[in-house]
Amino acid sequence: ECMCPHPSCLCGMGHLATVCALVLSTLSSIGGDTGDPEFCPRTTAFPPPARLRQLFWLHFPKTGTSFGNTVYPHACPRLPPTARLPRLPPTVQLATEPRRKEPGRLMRTFVSKYRIQDYCDADAFAPELRRVDGQGVSSLVKAISGHYPMQKELAESRRGVAMVRSPLGRLVSGFPYRHAVGMSEQNHARLWNVSTLVEYATFPGVSACQTKMLIGHHCGRDVSLTPMDAVRAIQRLSTALAFVGITDFWDASICLFHRKFGGSPSTFELHNVRSTLIWEGQNTTSTPTPRSATATNDRLSASEVATAVRSGATLDPFDTVVFQAALQIFMQQCEMHNVPVPPAAALNVVSMSAMCTQHPEHAVFCSKQVQTALGRLDGTRT
């Protein structure tokens, strides 16, 4: 049986058992626009929520730009109620975004319109971000609206927020755009020549995006990683981040954010402002013609995604490990803050020992240091 928290999912036999891949990431919305929606009813929170100050958003590409509709109203309470990211139909994105698009353009436009100095408290964002380029506010805007990696000054700060996504879901979402922020111009031009999801996932620099950003590298940089890099990434999920949400369990993640840091959740936080055009024949109500909507290498067939699902964790072993760590932290935080844990969350937890048995070719699965680091998050599971 396939259990999914959202109807837009694909099920198939994966690396351990039945795998549920949330390949469309279509976020639900539940009527209304303000107040106390059903997905996160009011409750007496313990520990009580406390506003997060001097925060930074570690924004992994293709994990949910929509999270900006939660982060910025929290950090900037003077924002008008109507200030929110616009919802862009996927065909509009494909039609208007160049192949070498500027990372974080939607967020940067929003932050430029609602200027930090006008709407945000002085201690809203991490002061360390102002030193990225030594350009004051302009560098702060660049850092908090783009896909920039972890700064070493923030590695022990426990002031970051991030959404982490299942590796397959992130790769499927990035494929139509050949997303690889930080990749060299030359390599990115070559990346546009790949025609299948598996080719995209295995192109040098594409995989391990979330792992690389946690340890200070750009998402699309071709970096040789070791199991100790995975250990460092796992550690930073706890030492650098105050909040770890899971894109695949969006509603519960938004509820958890508010249970931890206060504020009333709104249903517009559930809106998917940057949905991805993935399936061949996928319906759309927007009129602009996509940049290459009819090209077979921009739209995935169900059989191609099924092939990727069967490949499972072998497409992105490092981010598989990081996702497992993030999932454990997320479930523990949900239990601590009285947020119902999505039933499918536990089904996605896997044992690294079992992964090593099935995929001994990937040293990161068999590393005792990695298994120990995961075991510290959950003493009963290694």
Image (cartoon, helix red, strand yellow):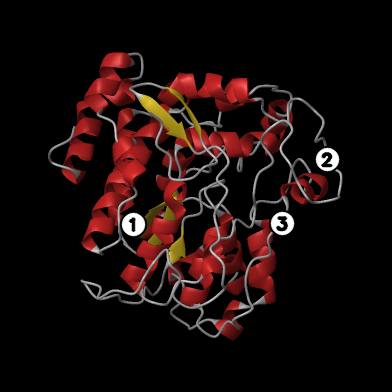
Q: Residue at x 18, y 32 (%)?
A: 382
Instruction: Tell me the residue at 71%/37% (across/down).
Output: 282
Q: Which residue is under mark 1?
A: 240
Residue 122 seen from this side:
yes
Query: Which comes sooner in the sequence, label 1 or label 3?
Result: 3
Q: Is residue 296 above or below residue 324?
A: above
Q: Is residue 275 left or right of residue 216?
A: right
Q: Quick one: 309 or 374, which is closer to the camera?
A: 309
Using the numbered discs, state the Cα–Cα distance from disc 1 to disc 2 in whole angstroms.
39 Å
* Labels 1 and 2: the sequence-earlier one: 1
In contact (CB < 8 Å): disc 3 and disc 2: no
Mark 3 or mark 2: whose residue is earlier in sequence: 3
| Amino acid type indicated by mark 1 | Ala
Q: Is residue 221 visible?
A: no
Looking at the picture, which amino acid does disc 3 mark? Leu
Circles 1 and 3, Cβ within 8 Å, touching? The answer is no
> Tag 1, which secondary structure?
loop
* Residue at 67 percent of width and 33 percent of height: 279
